[in-house]
Amino acid sequence: MKTKRLWNLVVAAVFGILCVLPMMSYAQAISGDIVGTVTDKSGGAVPGATVTAENVATGVKSSTTTNDHGEYRLGNLPVGTYNIHAVAANFAETTMANFVVELNKTQTAALVLQVGQQVTTIEVSGAPPPINTTSPQIEGTFDKQAASDSPVASIGFGVLNLALLEPGVASSGGLGAGTGPSVGGQRPRNNNFTIEGVDNNNKGVTGPLVTVPNDAVEEFSALQNQFSPEFGHSTGGQYNTIVVSGTNQFHGKAYEYFNNRNLDAIDESTIQSGFTSNPRNDFNRYGGQVGGPIVKNKLFFFANYEMNTLGQLLPPGGQTCAPTAAGYAALTAITGPAGLSATNVAQLAKYVAPAPASTSGTCNTNVNGTDPAGNANTNNQIFVTNPGVLAGFTGIDVGVLSIPALFFQNTKLLTTSMDYDFSAKDQIRGRYVYNSLDALDNAANLPIFFQLSPTRYHLVSLAEYHTFNSAVQNEIRLSFNRYENHTPTGNFIYPGLDQFPNIGLGDLGINVGPDPNGPQFAIQNYYSATDNVSWVKGNHTFKFGMDLHKYIAPQQFTQRARGDYEYNTADIFLHDQNPDFLAQRSLGSTTYYGDQIGIFWYVNDNWKIRHNLTINLGLRHEYTTIPVGERRQALNSAASVPGLIDFSEPRAPKKNFMPRVGFAWSPGSKGTTSVRAGFGMGYDVLYDNIGTLEKPPQLSGTVDQTFPPLINNYLANGAILPSVGDLQSFTPATANCVAHGVAAGLPCQRFSSVNHLIVDQKDPVAVEWNLSVQHSFGSKYSVEVRYLGTHGYHLNVQQHPNFRSRVDATHFLPTFLTAPSLADRDVLGTMNTLTTLKAVSPVVPAFAAAGFTQAPGITEFAPVGNSIYHGLAVQATRRISNGLQFTGAWTWSRVIDDSTADFNSTVLTPRRGQDFQNLRADRSVSALNRTHRITITANYDLPYFKSGNWLTRNVLGNWAFVPIYTYQSPEWATVQSATDSNLNGDTAGDRVLVNKAGVPGTGSGVTSLRDSAGEVVAYLVINPTAQYIRANPGALANNPTSIPGVVAAGSGLQIAGRNTLPTRPINNFDLTAVKKFNISESKRIEFQAQFSNILNHPQFVPGFVNRVDSVSFPAGISPGPQSFTRAHDGGFNQIQNEFSSNSRTIQLVVKLVF
């Protein structure tokens, strides 16, 4: 009710504001501006001159008049090409032709009037490349041609990949958290995605929702770190996509993009899997578009429709075994009261097809070559207990069941736009984008359980622009987007159970049941009302506005919601006994509500102190309510302990003020040099994935049934029964509390409190500062040199605050390079043993006294992370001339942080720190650090054979090439021990010991050393020349070079830092080759060949070499990357064995353009 009242008040307040303020919008979020001066030949200002910008494509005109200083501003112009006309009394009209307005940019056009009547026309192509002389904003734009022809704009997330061509960015690599590049050292989650200024962010996990096909993109802009206070939500990149509009001429396109396995080079990872050719991979993307006038110079439309089909057949992920036909017959024969469960045998036969008979030993589960009685047996068999036979068991024939990983995905995309210029002062723009994606969910082990997972996206925007006069403009925009995804688990029925569970049979390597993560769904409805204002007063250009956001976002995901029953052997399952490996089920209310309200406002002043010096002063404020689902933590408030931990309802931050200050100075009067500097502060958002995992125990709990004791008729009697009612009570004690000897009531409640949300919420913060110099050289070239620094704090970090390390400088087990004597080991045994170290509780005493003792501890996402970035970037640009344009960028940077990933998204840099009580010890080079990044991109439309006969022009001529070269320094990874080295109850962040004299890049395991009593007292390095040494339990400490009373020399091994292992650099060359055939003056056919990694240079890197897609390597299901980071593993630092080589891919394209 409180939320509803707040929303009603907000709506009323906005309505009042819109009624009271007679203003017009200044919406750089979806357009651009032109500013400049009108002077006479002597340089004197011409006040009262009329300046008109006429859109070449639509004929729509926007006009204003110059002030007393001869200055003018034309705001809110749709991106495109314009002819700018200036006229005044006693002066001839002057026209600047083909001036390009770019998204999110304020560009300068200086006009000189001649006395007399002769009209003057200036071709802008002869002007120097435009540089920013009006604001400190860091910006980059990509036009329609880049979106259409770039070899990276049509793969993955489409035009978003173009952001990687900007300076000051780095690829996210194998971080697996967030979409887009790391911008100025920020986490990829800190990026903001919009379409025509409309929020397009997934509030669940961050990243974009709706996709606009690259052929439907008019322009794409990328703002970095320093931007106008009009932009908020995030502190990294601001990525805005503009849709193609209709024009006065009908125009359109039909196109197809095609790729399959026969076009691509075979990846090294595929070869190492034993294959000599690529598996099936058929991708086809085809569509068409048309745009034009409904009423010329007034009303325009555009529509693009596209379909994508993808079919894949991947190699089996691992060996799966199943009974043969004879094996099933044997199982059926021994069912009955004293034998196997007829139900379980029938269910296994129903969902697991018989495997072909085999005489090889690939499914021989009796690895010792004997049966349970000790007799020799090397057959492909499993054994089931059978009291009806003399031996007491029966061998069941099994074989390898080939299960290829089938996958298909069908996508439909509709993109539309409408523009109505119903008067010189009023415009309406409408946009609607629809995406439909149907994919086969193949996460289940068996294809019979594969389900179709549908996803739908909608984005709608309607904006009205009104010009009151040359000084005041206003925009009001209403927008909506919707995202809906379902992961169903089908209508499968298991007799005796309320839902079909997941049943794992260890000896067969099989899992029977639907997607283990299903069922789940996510729905996100976003409503927004925006009003923006621009007011020019003297030397000031004031801008202010307000955004109102409302989210309705239910989602449901509970791990093991249907029950997870895992057996070491099929024998136990077939006898319907309780699992001997794992029996868990999560119970309780499972729907999380991410409903929120956001109120954002900003003010900004561009103060033009002189004709060549502009000061920017701005302030933004954002207030977002706590999601409804997170407020339910208050249900657990009785478990709070004052001064220790608080389970009250979280409170939203109210002081998220974001100041922006900067200047732009253009020395002299030519406007060919610009010196810009800025300082800003911004806040990011916290995403729903945090709240969905932090439910109070009243809403969600896990029942874990241990074995022993033995339970017969386990599945037949319902296994773990579903909960009754919405809220879980702790009186009487829950089954989990009873199993651990915890009393009912408050003790059980605290013991069950394993999730905690910080009550005083703090959004992630980034402070940034920058200085840049731009200069134009002649009419073709410009260069910018820029320094950027950022400092992030209150960054999200996952931790267990109630657990501590039991290892310190005096309580640890030493690791030796040479073996100590038994006498030395006995001395060590008087100091510490593994038994004495483990005897100390890992729970922080204050938490233990309060009863918060359940392992692995309270999971908390705390705002305690920090980062620092320093970067120097150089960018050189050549304006198009003789068909050639190019941009080259080099960034030299360093990022230091104490945390990067906050979820289980990568094993390369652990999501939790090594010591929950000392995050400072994790401060190091960041997983996002890329010391050097170089990108060079060009577009060369060969100027040869442009004239002559048709054959000459279309066979020898009309060639274009779009190359992209990328070099990037390696991503850094953390070398890990993969064991609880410091005995804090967690293995995720435990690093290794480093031998400074060791061979770089090598690793070693250790063996245990025992004293005379048999206690583990130390460890011995297996390979003493290795650089990285595994820290076994109790050994994660800095080793001295000598130990009192011990003759053997100490190793001097030290705790390794975080992120010390480099992966490999990116060294990549992409290319698009274009051949055009002109059918007529307005019609042509284009053929393109788009190459990714055209040289097929092996690049064993985590993630993609040319895409912003998020690539994850979660712990537990990424054996290759895990081996790469584990010092004791045979795959340590063998990156060529663990990652893709990013082999060459080819995409063929044909387009009919009219």
Image (cartoon, grey):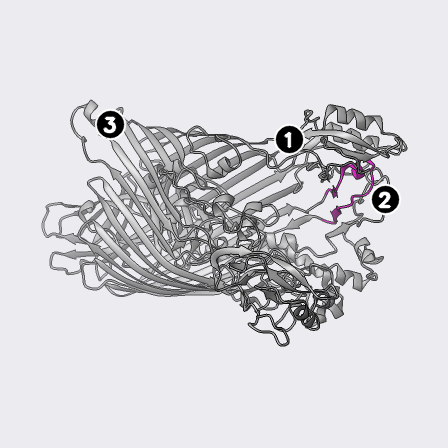
Q: Which residue is mark 2?
A: 711
Q: Amino acid at mark 3?
A: Glu
Is residue 943 left or right of 320 when viewed as pictured?
left
Q: Amino acid at mark 2?
A: Ile
Are the two marked residues, 2 and 1, in contact with CB atoms closer than 8 angstroms? no
Q: Which residue is mark 1?
A: 447
Is residue 1099 left or right of 1112 when viewed as pictured?
left
Q: What separation in Å lies between label 3 and label 2 (alpha carbons)?
A: 82 Å
The quadrant of the image that shows the C terminus is: top left
Q: Nearer the viewer, mark 3 or mark 1?
A: 1
Pick the residue in front: 801 or 43.
801
Pick the residue in front: 461 or 1034.
1034
Return the disc, 2 or 1, that comes first in the chain's sequence. Answer: 1
Q: Which residue is mark 3?
A: 1081
| Picture residue at 62% right of the left edge, 76% below the top | 1044
Question: What stretch of residues is rendered in magenta?
Answer: 562-589
Q: Amino acid at mark 1?
A: Pro
Is residue 646 left or right of 891 when viewed as pictured?
right
Is residue 905 shown in magenta?
Answer: no
Return the disc, 3 or 2, that comes first in the chain's sequence. Answer: 2
